[in-house]
Image (tube, rainbow, N blue to C red):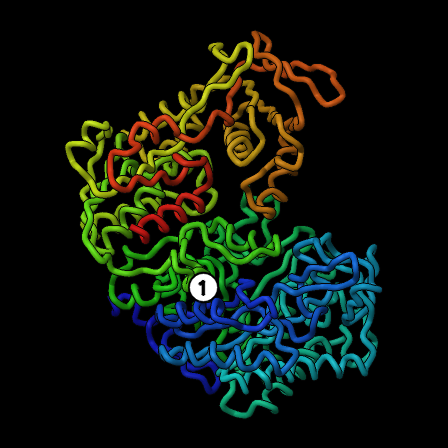
């Protein structure tokens, strides 16, 4: 296996720093800092976990060089006070905490860098004040609200020459503190729409001095000076690499690939490495995750010059090729849904010097180690759902949908310890919650049996994989991972086996875990029993029948040919399940209306902010009426009668009504097994209907607690 990934696993150099292999953990925010914004035990444990997992070069998350203007994740309060929820290294008081972090990483032989940034005009959360008296944003040039190239930016004013020198000092001082804290390198981030990019991009830069847009030398001067001063202060054994936009889209003055490559050639004269990024104006989030702009359907015009042949995987690799074609000799890399397989291929072809990964290592910090050991089937697969990024967009702490222990490495309930005494554990239900509980309980030394009444594992995930239209990576990859781990841990799996109280009494388990999923509930509405109504229970029953013969991917394709759903459909429920079903049916030629009996604010609940920003315009384009805050009155031969808030009544005409709101806790099942074992745990949607992230988290805590 090592030979299969020979290039990926070989050591390499970034300036004076030797990496363990060619996998780079690229920077991403976590908000794991302590309340006083220092680097504390929780953050140290997170990064030590990554270092222990075998990554070649670890870049600590985006850290502001000025406070509060240098960070974008900060709460402003009405009394004028503010509190950051993002790292910043603008003061020596932060050095001791970071020194503990670098010591923890070095203990495992992992070189560690830290990314520095200055938010400048960027406002990705939409929560920052636009009043320049509150947030005095300084950039290359003045930009009024009318001048801004998109919705997620703040007005800014032009830096004076003295302020420009002050900013360079901020960058270099942060690098100097990082050096004192034991970091091997730092990354200077002038990408996305941060302050640094306002010099590189002609959209923002209107200066008339030597930092203006008149030449590539001028445009890169600010970045080059930041790098040079950082290197001067930190000495020859400290690497300074950089990240910036090689290309921009969505504006007449956007940086072209040719321009970006020429600027990279100049930056390479002073930097030790370049991380290539693309930016797209007019949509929040830009092209940080290129794969997500394909949801719910690829835009009419995909950004030219990128590689869209693999649904976003490797999309920005052509930028690296463009830079290398200019004769750049320092290492060049990018991060865009790369994995060990396509990473090795790109390295072998010379398209990359390093393989940047973020989400994959969040999902499984041990990915590099598993590749080294020839255990790729044990890699916990990232589906690219962006739940992690969405938590940050809401100024929350990082969380992963499939890795329950992420950021919880020190919490008592997430500690992995061998069981003190071996117990007989019976798990009812083969969904994500049940399998995660079974996997961990068995790994800890318990005797575990798992019973699934259906013909396949995964609970509702295979059904979701059909409806999600495989927009992200196949959700069933996560099911495959769990099924493989359950088998490897020696769990006795009984398929097509409905559990009864009599079976439990016969097996006599010490611990019973009930993870059989949510209950299909009834809803009180005139006409609810009409043949016009297609309930979730019936829809799921049909899909589960066909899943005995076809994979989710095959059913997804077949559903475009035939579906047992009328041509005109009203979808009841406007949260995640309703939105995804409305999208799915519309793509299959149905005329759809979506209606929700809760407030407008609940629409799309459970989906990421970025996906919703893409979904709402798509629904308008596809003429999907959305009704929120309504009262359901009756289902009749014409359709669904509703009453809106001003008491007017309407009939939403349709051939079929599909409800997505008939879910509830499976209390009847829970009661049926109550008291049949010394320990009985009700977990996942059986306890309370939730999302995959909830199911995995609950399964993990139970599996670790037994």
Question: Which residue is drawn at the image coordinates 21% and 30% (left, top)?
Answer: 497
Q: Residue furthest left?
A: 506
- List the residue tagged with mark 1: 357
The total of numbered circles placed on residues is: 1
Which quadrant holds residue 499? Answer: top left
Question: Which residue is drawn at the image coordinates 65% and 38% (left, top)?
Answer: 617
> Does residue 705 show up?
yes
Q: Nearer the viewer, residue 138 or 302?
A: 138
Question: Which residue is drawn at the image coordinates 20% and 40% (left, top)?
Answer: 509
- The percent position of residue 657, horizontal first and vertical second, equals 53, 18
Q: Residue furthest top?
A: 637
- The percent position of residue 302, horizontal first and vertical second, equals 58, 49
* Mark 1, secondary structure of its residue: strand
Q: Nearer the viewer, residue 682 or 329?
A: 682
Q: Residues within 10 Å of mark 1 (few under 14, many from 20)?
A: many
Which quadrant holds residue 684? Answer: top left
In the picture, measured across the screen, residue 403 lies left or right of residue 549, that is: right
In the picture, measured across the screen, residue 65 lies left or right of residue 253, that is: left
Up-down: is 241 above or below 621?
Answer: below
| Image quadrant occupied by the N terminus | bottom left
> Does residue 351 show up?
no
- The percent position of residue 586, horizontal first and vertical second, equals 54, 28
- The percent position of residue 140, horizontal first and vertical second, equals 77, 72
In the picture, measured across the screen, residue 260 lies left or right of residue 108, that is: right
Up-down: is 323 above or below 564?
Answer: below
Question: Which residue is drawn at the image coordinates 60% and 24% (left, top)?
Answer: 593
Q: Nearer the viewer, residue 335 or 33?
A: 33
Up-down: is 695 above or below 157?
Answer: above
């Amino acid at each position: 296996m090592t030979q299969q990934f020979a290039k990926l696993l070989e050591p390499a150099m970034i300036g004076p720093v030797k990496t363990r292999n060619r996998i780079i953990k690229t920077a991403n925010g976590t908000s794991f800092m302590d309340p006083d914004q220092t680097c504390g035990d929780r953050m140290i444990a997170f990064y030590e976990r990554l270092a222990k997992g075998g990554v070649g070069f670890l870049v600590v998350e985006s850290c502001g060089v000025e406070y509060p203007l240098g960070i974008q994740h900060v709460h402003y309060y009405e009394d004028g006070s503010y509190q950051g929820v993002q790292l910043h290294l603008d003061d020596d008081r932060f050095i001791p905490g970071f020194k503990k972090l670098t010591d923890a990483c070095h203990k495992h032989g992992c070189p560690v860098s830290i990314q520095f940034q200055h938010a400048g005009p960027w406002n990705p959360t939409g929560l920052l004040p636009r009043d320049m008296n509150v947030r005095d944003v300084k950039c290359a040039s003045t930009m009024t609200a009318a001048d801004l190239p998109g919705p997620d930016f703040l007005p800014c004013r032009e830096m004076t020459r003295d302020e420009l020198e002050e900013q360079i000092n901020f960058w270099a001082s942060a690098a100097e503190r990082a050096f004192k804290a034991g970091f091997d390198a730092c990354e200077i981030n002038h990408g996305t729409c941060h302050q640094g990019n306002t010099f590189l991009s002609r959209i923002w830069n209107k200066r008339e001095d030597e930092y203006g847009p008149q030449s590539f030398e001028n445009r890169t001067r600010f970045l080059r000076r930041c790098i040079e001063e950082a290197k001067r202060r930190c000495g020859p054994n400290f690497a300074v690499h950089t990240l910036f936009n090689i290309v921009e889209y969505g504006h007449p003055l956007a940086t072209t690939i040719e321009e970006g490559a020429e600027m990279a050639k100049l930056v390479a004269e002073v930097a030790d490495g370049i991380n290539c990024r693309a930016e797209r104006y007019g949509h929040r989030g830009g092209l940080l995750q290129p794969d997500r702009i394909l949801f719910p359907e690829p835009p009419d015009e995909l950004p030219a010059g990128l590689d869209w042949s693999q649904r976003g995987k490797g999309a920005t690799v052509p930028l690296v090729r463009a830079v290398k074609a200019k004769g750049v000799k320092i290492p060049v890399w990018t991060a865009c849904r790369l994995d060990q397989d396509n990473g090795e291929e790109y390295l072998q072809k010379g398209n990359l010097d390093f393989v940047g990964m973020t989400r994959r290592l969040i999902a499984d910090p041990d990915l590099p180690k598993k590749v080294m050991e020839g255990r790729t089937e044990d890699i916990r697969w990232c589906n690219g759902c962006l739940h992690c990024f969405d938590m940050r967009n809401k100024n929350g702490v990082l969380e992963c949908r499939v890795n329950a222990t992420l950021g919880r490495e020190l919490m008592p309930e997430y500690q992995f310890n061998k069981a003190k005494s071996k117990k007989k554990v019976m798990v009812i239900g083969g969904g994500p919650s049940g399998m995660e509980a079974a996997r961990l309980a068995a790994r800890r030394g318990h005797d575990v049996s798992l019973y699934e009444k259906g013909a396949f594992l995964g609970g509702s995930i295979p059904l979701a994989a059909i409806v999600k239209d495989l927009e992200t990576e196949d959700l069933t990859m996560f099911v495959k991972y769990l099924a493989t781990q359950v088998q490897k841990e020696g769990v006795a799996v009984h398929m097509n086996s409905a559990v009864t109280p009599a079976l439990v009494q016969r097996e006599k388990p010490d611990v019973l875990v009930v993870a059989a999923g949510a209950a299909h509930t009834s809803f009180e509405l005139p006409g609810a029993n009409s043949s016009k109504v297609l309930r979730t229970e019936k829809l799921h029953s049909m899909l589960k029948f066909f899943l005995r013969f076809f994979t989710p991917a095959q059913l997804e394709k077949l559903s475009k040919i035939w579906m047992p759903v009328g041509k005109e459909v009203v979808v009841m429920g406007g949260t995640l399940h309703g939105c995804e079903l409305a999208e799915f049916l519309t793509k299959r030629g149905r005329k759809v209306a979506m209606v929700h009996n809760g407030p407008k604010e609940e629409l799309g609940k459970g989906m990421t902010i970025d996906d919703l920003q893409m979904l709402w315009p798509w629904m308008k384009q596809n003429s999907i009426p959305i009704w929120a805050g309504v009262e359901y009155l009756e289902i009749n031969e014409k359709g669904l009668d509703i009453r809106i808030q001003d008491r007017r009544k309407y009939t939403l005409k349709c051939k079929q009504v599909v409800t997505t709101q008939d879910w509830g806790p499976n209390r009847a099942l829970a009661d049926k097994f109550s008291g049949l074992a010394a320990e009985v745990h009700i977990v996942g949607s059986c306890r309370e209907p939730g999302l995959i992230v909830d199911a995995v988290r609950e399964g993990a805590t139970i599996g670790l607690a037994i």
